[in-house]
Image: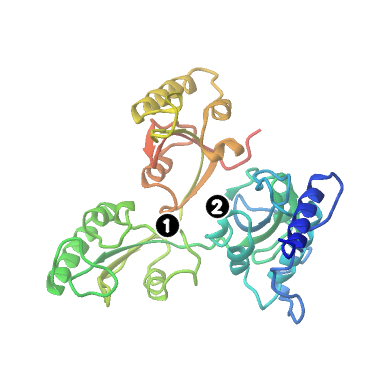
Amino acid sequence: MSSRAPSIRGLLLGLLALAIPGCERELPSPVADLPPLAGLTPDPARSPSGGPGGLPEVFRASQILVRYQGALESARFLPRTRAGALERARTLATLARSQQHTFGALVRQFSDDTRTSMQAGDLGPLARGELHPDLEQALAGLAPGQVSDPVESPWGFHVLQRTEAGLVQAGDLLIAYDGAQRYSPRSPRTREEAAALAEAIHRRLRAGGSFVDEVVAHSDLPDFDRGGLLSPFAPGTVHPKFEELALALPAEGGLGEVVETPNGFHIVIRLPLRRVRCRLLGLEVRQAPELPADRHRTLEQAMERAHELRAQALAPGADFAGLVARESEHPSRARGGLQVFEGRGRYHPALEQAAFALAEGELSPPIEAEGMVYLLRRVPFQPEP
């Protein structure tokens, strides 16, 4: 017992230090697990240049988030003070501006935001007015590729990187066969049968058939039920062969020929990249057996409630933003339900299809998707008063 006493005593003292206002004792050092700063070579392309600021109508950014005790959504016993978090964020910013480290790798290893860490910190497509004002002000002073100094928000300290908006929208349909590498056909078929099926699908697509419908019916990729459309991607971030096939097609959209790889027969499509902005209201379907009875909500009940709210939203003079603030149970409620849909393949196909079909100001009927029921209203990109 006596050999363990010093470490236990140190832990108790560290926790006590966090509990006493104004005490800045850190346990452990806030940068102990970070790569060393010695020997770094700065990358001038990642450092702010101080040029004229401004953000386009739609922009993209990635972040490393450093939380501290007392910040919003921080762990209750996070052993990091605000001063320690700032030191850690400054170190991460220096690392992110060096030639030895990539921003995405630092995000995956060290960001405290679990919602974006597996996407290299990508915050998704954003319209002006959707982020915390201090974060937008910092991003307005960056060119694509540049990395900010730490910026504080109620969630902690953010290290931000402006990312390129030159994205590609494409989709992949795969017809596999018995013995092909990596993927198996949903129904047994020979290579010759796979080739014949791929050519038949290609003919239907050339005649104006639906790529998504053909994917759902025939593709052997594991996410076939989502329609085969990939989230918009930047060059260099997807499989080189797929990128080569997609970039060979015109940017305004085109259908590739049937191409054979060791995985089977591929048909690649490229689509023009479209963006719409919606205000979203989401209601949870809650049917987990461990929930108390008064917390349960069946799909039928959620749909019924969504119809009631839609009727309220369509009444003369109705305030849909206020309705979202009161009723929505989706995380976007924190920003008034505002969501930019950039291309296809990022969100549930039913939501994307509805968003792109809406005229500006139009309100969708209730939409069921992934355990929630949604109402969408398309709004302009300009920040609303």
Amino acid type assigned to the residue bearing label 1 in the image = Pro
Disc assigned to residue 115:
2
Identify which residue, 29 or 228, lies in the foreground: 29
Question: Does the CB distance between marks 2 and 1 fall below 8 Å?
Answer: no
Left or right of residue 115: residue 142: right
Does 348 appear above or below 320? below
Can residue 177 be seen here? The reply is: yes
Q: Position of residue 288 (x, y in %)?
A: 40, 36
Mark 2 element type: helix
Determine the secondary structure under disc 1: loop
The amino acid at mark 2 is Arg
Choose top left, top right, bottom left or bottom right for residue 211.
Answer: bottom left
Pointer 1 residue: 272
Q: In which quadrant will I find the N terminus?
A: bottom right
The alpha-carbon separation of the residues under discs 2 and 1 comes to 28 Å
Residue drawn at x 36%, y 29% as measured from the top left: 298
Give the percent coordinates (x, y) of residue 274.
46, 52
Q: Nearer the viewer, residue 217 or 258?
A: 217
The structure residue drawn at horizontal position 54% and vertical position 25%, both measured from the top left corner, is: 323
For disc 1, the neighbor class at 10 Å (few under 14, some 14 to 19, many from 20) is some
Q: Position of residue 313 (x, y in %)?
A: 49, 23
Depth check, mark 2 against mark 1: the one in front is: 2
